[in-house]
Amino acid sequence: RLYGGIAHPYGNSTTIPLNRRFFAGGSNDIRGWGPFQLGPGTIRSEDVRINGGEIKLAAFTEARQIFIRDLIGANWHAAWYVDAGNIWYGPKNDAADDSELEDGRFKFNDFYNQIAVGSGLGLRLDWQYIVARFDFTFRAHDLEVGWFNNKKLYFSFGIGHSF
């Protein structure tokens, strides 16, 4: 699945309302980061003053294979996945001139260096009426420490397929 979006204020408005902004992270988005923990850009999560972003790019891939059929009424699937993406502030953001937010701005010549990547293994319990997901994610590209420098595993649980 590929996802891209741009939210742009119109009229006299200079910001996008919070409920219309993009967010990244969580069990149904870029796994390995908690809900709303990723981005904007390379701004550290504890330094974020304006929640969400006006631009979002993301890509998700997942492969599943049944390895046990009909145990406790469910088919058991092994899953392997890679999630990548981020959010950024747009050019018309209310704080566009704030130099502290520069790392959160979308820059066409540098955005690819600000793509977070999580990869992992998961277990799917697939009953005919519901799917339970248990995922263990390694942050392959953690924007705060670089490529392959975060050795922690992150757990996430979800109901239904991630996409």
Image (cartoon, rainbow, N blue to C red):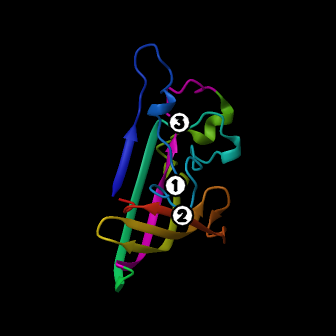
**Whole-percent x and y of residue 88?**
52, 41
Amino acid type, residue under disc 3 in the picture: Tyr
In the displayed structure image, the side of residue 98 where residue 108 appears, left or right: left
Q: Nearer the viewer, residue 156 or 119?
A: 156
Which residue is label 2 attached to? 156
Q: Which residues are magenta?
A: 73-97
Distance Cα–Cα, label 2 vs label 3: 27 Å
Instruction: From the top left corner, tell me how far across and down residue 16 is, in percent.
Output: 48, 27
Q: Mark 1 or 2 closer to N-term?
A: 1
Q: Secondary structure at mark 1?
A: loop
Q: Are marks 1 and 2 in contact (CB under 8 Å)?
A: yes
Q: Amino acid at mark 1?
A: Gly
**Tag 1 near tag 3, CB within 8 Å:** no
Report which residue position mark 3 lands on: 89
The circle drawn on residue 26 is: 1
- Residue count near mark 3 (Cα–Cα under 10 Å), binned few <14, some 14–19, many ≥20: many
